[in-house]
Amino acid sequence: MEHALRLRWDRATIAARVAELGARITAAYAGRDLLMVTVLKGGAVFLADLVRAVDADVDVDFLAVRLLHSGTSGSVGISKDLEVDIAGRDVLLVEDVIRSGLTMSHLVRTLAARDPASVRVCTLLDGIDRRRVSVPVDHVGFEVGSELLVGYGLDLDGWFRNCPDLWEVVDERAVRASPLAALARIRSIEGASPRT
């Protein structure tokens, strides 16, 4: 299990980048009616930190999506919709990771049809090299490739969401076979590092 996971970004690096994004969003939405929306479940951790880094009055809401059918179309539907009316409001979609762009493209189109003042996108991780459809992303934390990442809200089979750092899964088979051993390895490394 020693080489099954590799640390990509520690909590201090993530926190610094989230603070930078928060400052940019604060400047971009000064004096405006901002609603920050995330896609459950993965985006909730990023949103929780990001909203506290924005120095403005901000409202939050949540969406959940589901795959409508398998195949190459990648059609998605909304399984949990917003609870607030977004007409006339500035909406910032906050996502943990954007890869193909299919889900985010669908959400941008869906929300834009509800007559908001604007719909923009912020993602912690942008996997631009795997994009299948174009999505304008206004705020990006880190660019990533095709690697599988866990921690800071991202999961593998429901595990690792609460790890404060972001880890690359180097040996997916080993991690899937023994997620508890992988978590123990992560915790031993995190325990040896000073907390920030």
Image (tube, grey):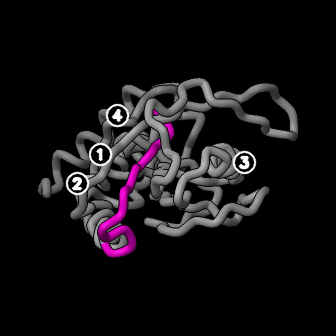
Between 84 and 60, the residue placed more toward the observer is 84
**Residue 128 position by quadrant:** bottom right
Dot 2 falls on a residue whose secondary structure is: helix
User: Is tag 3's residue or tag 1's residue first in the polypeptide sequence?
Assistant: 1
Kindly check if marks 2 and 1 are in contact, taking CB atoms under 8 A apart as contact: yes
Residue type, label 1: Ala
Tell me what residue is drawn at x 32 percent, y 36 percent.
Answer: 162
Q: Position of residue 104 (x, y in %)?
A: 64, 49
Whole-Å distance between the Cαs marked 2 and 1? 7 Å
Q: Position of residue 29 (x, y in %)?
A: 37, 68
Q: Residues within 10 Å of mark 1 (few under 14, many from 20)?
A: few
Q: Which residue is mark 4?
A: 183
User: Is tag 3's residue or tag 4's residue first in the polypeptide sequence?
Assistant: 3
Q: Position of residue 15 (x, y in %)?
A: 26, 61
Q: Which residue is mark 2?
A: 52
Q: Which residue is mark 1?
A: 48
Whole-Å distance between the Cαs marked 3 and 2? 28 Å
Whole-Å distance between the Cαs marked 3 and 4? 31 Å
Between 13 and 100, the residue placed more toward the observer is 100
Residue type, label 4: Leu
Q: Is residue 36 visible?
A: yes
